Amino acid sequence: MGSLTRSQLIVYGAVAVVLLLVGARWIRSGDAQGQPAGDVNYSESSTGAPAPDGASGTLAVDVEGGTDVVVDVAGAVGDPGVYRLPAGSRVNDALQRAGGATARADVESINLAARLTDGQQVVVPQKVRGSVAATTGASATQADASAPISIGTATVEDLDTIEGIGPVTAQNIVDFRDQQGGISSVDQLDEISGIGPATMEALRSRLQP
């Protein structure tokens, strides 16, 4: 084959340029059908439902997700202060983060399972000493009310606390004791007018010589 003429070289060169241009345009056309650069694909939500059509460019949000919460823990805890906890944390998580409850904390008065909200203040109260003292005092009073009464030193007020004994009968018992110069046995009270068998049983259960 002989050497190509100048005209043929020009024609071949033009054909090559045209082929290159067509190939480049074809490649660009294929890229245009794909995902545009810089867009964010939709992901499935926490419920598994696909993203809506035509909603490209928007981030998917997890239904159960969220930002951290900042809470103020005060009261009877080891280290009161402001703490940041993960979303969905409970009051008990905040209490533990603050060093736990002290020995005087009344944790039964708060709901440890309650979910925390941002900006919430968790106050752990202290036990009230007065309530303990009142309970102790009430127990002591009940114990005194059921304790045996000495018939030799009982007053009208003491005798009036016995079931079935009113102020009049109580005064009669004191007068009878004074007249006898003392009482050595509860059975002697049977001599007092107005005291029957039922009253004597009550006296025997509460009085002692």
Image (cartoon, rainbow, N blue to C red):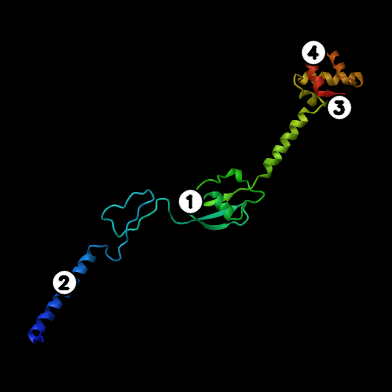
Q: Position of residue 75 (x, y in %)?
A: 60, 52
Q: Is mark 3 on a helix, strand or loop?
A: loop
- In the image, is 113 to the left or to the right of 55? right
Q: In which quarter of the image is residue 161?
A: top right
Which residue is identified by label 2? Answer: 22
| Disc number for residue 197 | 4
> Between disc 1 and disc 2, whose residue precedes?
2
> Between disc 2 and disc 3, whose residue precedes?
2
Q: How far apart are marks 1 and 2 (CA)?
A: 58 Å
Say if mark 1 contacts mark 2, CB within 8 Å: no
Which residue is identified by label 3? Answer: 153
- The amino acid beneath tag 1 is Gly
Report the front residue among 18 and 49.
18
> Between disc 4 and disc 2, whose residue precedes?
2
- In the image, is 61 to the left or to the right of 14? right
Q: Distance between the residues labelled 4 and 3?
A: 23 Å
